Image: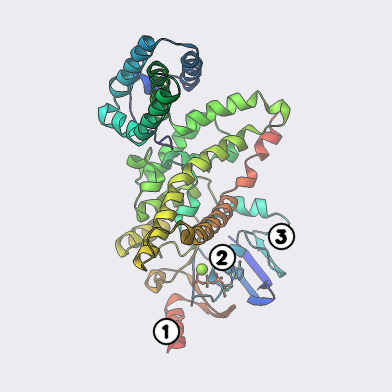
Amino acid sequence: MIAGLYVPGESPLHRLDVGVKLLVLMALGIGLILTKSVLLLILVVAVTGLLFAFAAELGLMRLWQTTRPLLIWFVFIAVAQILVANAETAGLIVLRLAVLVWAAALVTYTTRLSDMMECLIRIIGWLSPLGVPPHRVAFMIALTIRLIPALSDVVQDVRDAQRARGIENSIIASVVPVLTRVFQQADAMSEALEARGYERWDDQRNNAP
Amino acid sequence: MNIALDHVTVRFQDRPVLTNVSVTLTENRIGVIGDNGSGKSTFARLLNGLLIPDTGAVLVNGVSTKTDGKEVRRQVGFLFQNPDNQIVMPTVAEDLALGLKPQRLESEDRDQKVAKMLERFGLSHLADRSAHLLSGGEKQLVALAGVMIAEPDIVVCDEPTTLLDQRNAAIVMSVIGSLPCPVITVTHHVEQLAGFDRVLVLADGKVVFDGNPKTALSFYKDSLA
Ligand SMILES: Nc1ncnc2c1ncn2[C@@H]1O[C@H](COP(=O)(O)OP(=O)(O)OP(=O)(O)O)[C@@H](O)[C@H]1O
Ligand SMILES: [Mg+2]
C-alpha cells in the first residue's frame, strides 16, 4: 500500500515541504494516542478523508483502494475490542487506525520518494556523529521499497509455473524456487550497482571540505 | 579508447572459461558473438573490472582493472541484459538521479540533468512512473539512460536486446548506435552487427575470429554447419 506510490500532481499537499508533512504526521500520531474523544476522532477522520480525496486530488476511488485491504483488520480489531472491552474503545481504536493509515498514505502519495529520502538524510544526518551513514540508510530504504513489487512478481511467476504443472498453492513447494530467484536477482542487482559506481558515492563526500 | 587484454585467463572452479585471450580494442563499434556458454558475458565483465582475470591483465586506457577497478568503472558504463536488475530506484527519474550521485550536485542541477537525459532518450513522459511497471523496451532505455547520465567514456552492452521484441530491439539498438562514445556490444542478433567496425567471435573461451562483420558472420555461420 505504501510502496513507492507517488502520484504526480500539483496540489497544495504535493507542494508542501516534506519535513512539514512528516512532522504533522508525527504530531498526529501522538495526538491520536492522547485523545479519548470519539467525536473529535470522527471529525479528524472526516477532515483527513476530505484532504485525501479532494485537497490532494487523489479521489474517493483511491481512498477506497487504500482502505479496502485493511477493512478485514478493522473489523477483526473492532470485534475483538467489543468482546474484551466495549464499543467505545473499539470505535476509538478503529478510528485512530483509519486516520493513521489515511494520513500516512496521503503523505506517501503526495511525496516523491527522493524528497522523502533527502528529508530522511537530513534527519539521520543529526545522528551521523553516532556513526550512522545517512546516505546508505536512505538508499537501503529506497532499495527495499523498489524490491517489494519485484518480489511479488517472483512469487506470482513461481506460483503460475507450479499451477501450470498441477501444483496448486503449495507454499512449501514455492519457498525454494522463490528464494533461489530472489538470491539470483539480488546477486545480479549488486553487480549492476557496482557497475553503476556504487563504490564511488562516498568519495566526493570524503574529499569535500 | 584503448582496452587491452593481455594473456587473459578466467577459470570458474578450475574450469577455464576464457583461455589466454589477448586483444586490443580501439574501434568505435565492436561486436562480440558466440554460442551460449562461449564466454561472452565473462569477456564483457572483464572490461569494467566486474571480473578480474585469474592470470593476465586488462588495461582500460592504461588503467588496470585489478588495481583500480573503481576508476575503470567510472570510465566504462555497463548495460545488462535484464534492466530489472539494473534499475534500482522506484521511479524513472529517481533511478537516473542515482547515476549522478558521485557528482554531489545541488538538487536543482541534478533535476535539470535528469530532465535533459530523459528528453534525449524520449522518456520525459515517464519521469515519475514506477520503473517496475514500464514495458521491456522502456525499461532497457531507462537503464541505458541511467548509464549515460554518469557520462562514461566507453559503454559495454551484454545482450541488451535479448529480452525485447523485434520492434523494441530495433529501437534500443538504434539508440545504442547513436551513442557518442565507443560501444562494445555482446549480441545474439547477428543482423545487428552490420554497421560495426569489428566483430569478435568467441567459442569455448577463445577468440576464434576477429575481423570485419561480414567475414565474421560467414565464419560464424560456417562454424554452425
Ligand atoms: N559465476 C560463475 N560460476 C561458475 N561458472 C560460471 C560463472 N559464470 C559463468 N560461468 C560459466 O562460464 C561459461 C561461460 O559463461 P558466459 O556467461 O561467459 O557465457 P555466454 O557466452 O555469455 O553465454 P550466454 O550466451 O548464455 O549468455 C559457462 O559455461 C558458464 O556456465
Ligand atoms: Mg551471457
Do marks 3 and 1 share a subunit? Answer: yes
The answer to whether residue A176 is above or below residue A129 is below
User: Tag on residue B44?
Assistant: 2
Q: Give the residue number, with chain letter if any, for mark 3.
A: B66
Quadrant (top left, top right, bottom left, bottom right) of the N terminus of chain B: bottom right
For the rendered model, the colour scheme is rainbow
What's under tag 2, amino acid-wise? Ala
Q: How many labels does the image show?
A: 3
Q: Give the residue number, with chain letter if any, for mark 1.
A: B221
The location of residue A165, given as percent across then percent down, is 37, 68
CA separation in Å, label 2 and label 1: 22 Å
Q: Which chain carries label 1?
A: B
CA separation in Å, label 3 and label 1: 36 Å
Mark 2 crowd level (few <14, some 14–19, many ≥20, 10 Å Cα): many
The location of residue B50, given as percent across then percent down, is 62, 59
Q: Mark 3 lies on which chain?
A: B
The location of residue B160, given as percent across then percent down, is 44, 61
Q: Is residue B177 visible?
A: no
Q: Which chain carries label 2?
A: B
Secondary structure category for the residue under label 3: loop
What's under tag 1, amino acid-wise? Lys
User: Tag on residue B152?
Assistant: none
Q: Which residue is drawn at 46% across and 39% down?
A: B94
The answer to whether residue A196 is above or below residue B224 is above
Q: Is tag 2's residue or tag 1's residue first in the polypeptide sequence?
A: 2
The location of residue A95, given as percent across then percent down, is 38, 20
What's under tag 3, amino acid-wise? Lys
Please report contact status of discs 3 and 2: CB closer than 8 Å, yes or no: no
CA separation in Å, label 3 and label 2: 15 Å
Q: Which residue is drawn at 37% across and 40% down?
A: B129
Quadrant (top left, top right, bottom left, bottom right) of the C terminus of chain B: bottom left
Q: Is tag 3's residue or tag 1's residue first in the polypeptide sequence?
A: 3
